[in-house]
Amino acid sequence: MADAKVIPFDDDRSRGGGAQRPARRRSPAGGRRKADAAVTGEAVVSALPGPQSGDGTDGGTGGARAQADPVASGARGADTASPPEGAADAEGGAGDGRKGVAAVPETPGTAAGTWDRRIAGGLAFLRRRITGDYEVDEFGYDAELTDQVLMSMLRPMYEKYFRVEVKGIENIPAEGGALVVANHSGTVPLDGLMMQVAVHDNHPAGRHLRLLAADLVFMLPVVNELARKAGHTLACAEDAEMLLQRGEVVGVMPEGFKGIGKPFGERYKLQRFGRGGFVSTALRARAPIVPCSIVGAEEIYPMIGNAKTLARLLGFPYFPITPTFPWLGPLGAVPLPTKWTIQFGEPIATDGYPPEAAEDPMLMFNLTDQVREQIQHTLYKLLVQRRSVFF
């Protein structure tokens, strides 16, 4: 029998220059599987009936040759033309276009290549951290650490534990500065972190939320460093205005400790929004104000009491007493798995006001009240739509 035409399953030329499929890293195991597939293909092809010579006198053998030649010629010309439909794919091992001849699937090899890339990326990340080859801005924000580590740590709580549902994310502009103003609750300020993950993971432009935090956050060991790395900064007008003018999305919760430390009986009732300093900052930076309403955070630690004496001794604004804390010890610090909804409302434009508007107390009061009422109204609407605290 004459030599049969064999399709080289692992011939790199079949990629046609690699224009249609990105190159992938292959593990040694994946290479051995490709070689086995090629040997199997040769064995099957050699067993097919074919002519002893190229005369094509027998109609049946000529038909077999007619099936073999186009595929083989397609493999030979893969470096100059696209492979024929159904021809062997060097990446996926889809088949060689001949009935009864198929390549071994490459799924395990592909998975191994994915893990290789992940390990290589992790090692490169560690090398940069050890050598100091990474960037931190003047506020201490470490974008790489936030994206690859901090967000990965918060994401399971965001997706699996609180099962956060996000609405109106498109109301945050795709570019330029914006001030997100949200209600504050929950005894422990997890709502700000969940809002940060919501913007990071859901915004179509991949924007990052820079939170303004109280000075207590930057007085606590470990928490101080992590907050800086995650992009948080002190809640002051100067820092907020600088971030907005740089085109950042800034988050603020004007209720402060009055919001997160309020009794459970006052849940979802907004506290006073201060003197409207956030409005003045937005007016100076000419940045839109995006109201944000968060439902679900109020019930994670139902605060039924406040040990004020102990709070003063520890230097805290309040010391919460909940149905589980401090009675259950460390277990009492585990939040309840409530179902969250975060809704970003219609932005309130500020670029239409003159520069001196930032000094107008009546205008600041009116805009502050407008933002507060919009958040409160949305909270009531979300509470009516909610089926259950936990589902």
Image: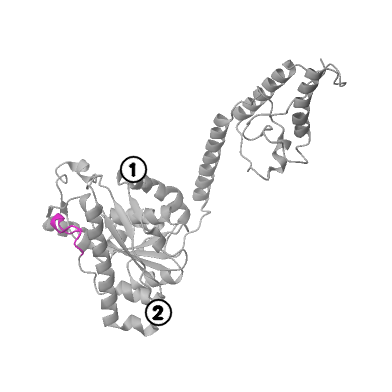
262 with respect to 75 (left or right)? left
Q: Return the residue at label 1.
A: 160
Q: Nearer the viewer, residue 4 or 181?
A: 4
**From the viewer's perspective, is the residue at label 1 or at label 2 nearer?**
2
Q: Crowding near pointer 2: few (<14 within 10 Å), some, many (20+)?
A: few
Q: Quadrant of the N terminus?
A: top right
Depth check, front residue: 112 or 86: 86
Q: Residue at x 55, y 29 (%)?
A: 108
| Position of 2 relative to 195 (above/below) | above
The colour style of the image is: one colour
Estimate the x, y position of residue 88 in percent, counting from the top left.
68, 32
Indicate yes or no whether the magenta region holds residue 49: no
Say whether residue 240 is left or right of residue 69. left
The local secondary structure at tag 2 comes to loop
- Quadrant in which the C terminus is drawn: top left
Q: Would you place residue 148 above or below residue 287 in this image?
A: above
Q: Which residue is mark 2?
A: 352
Q: Report if the CB atoms under discs 1 and 2 are less than 8 Å apart.
A: no
User: Badge 1: how crowded within 10 Å, few (<14), some, or many (20+)?
Assistant: few
* Position in image of residue 86 (x %, y %): 67, 33
Q: Residue at x 76, y 29 (%)?
A: 72
Q: Which residues are magenta?
A: 261-270
Relative horizontal placement of residue 282, taking residue 10 as reference (left or right): left
Amino acid identity at mark 2: Gly
Q: Does the rendering let one see residue 221? A: no
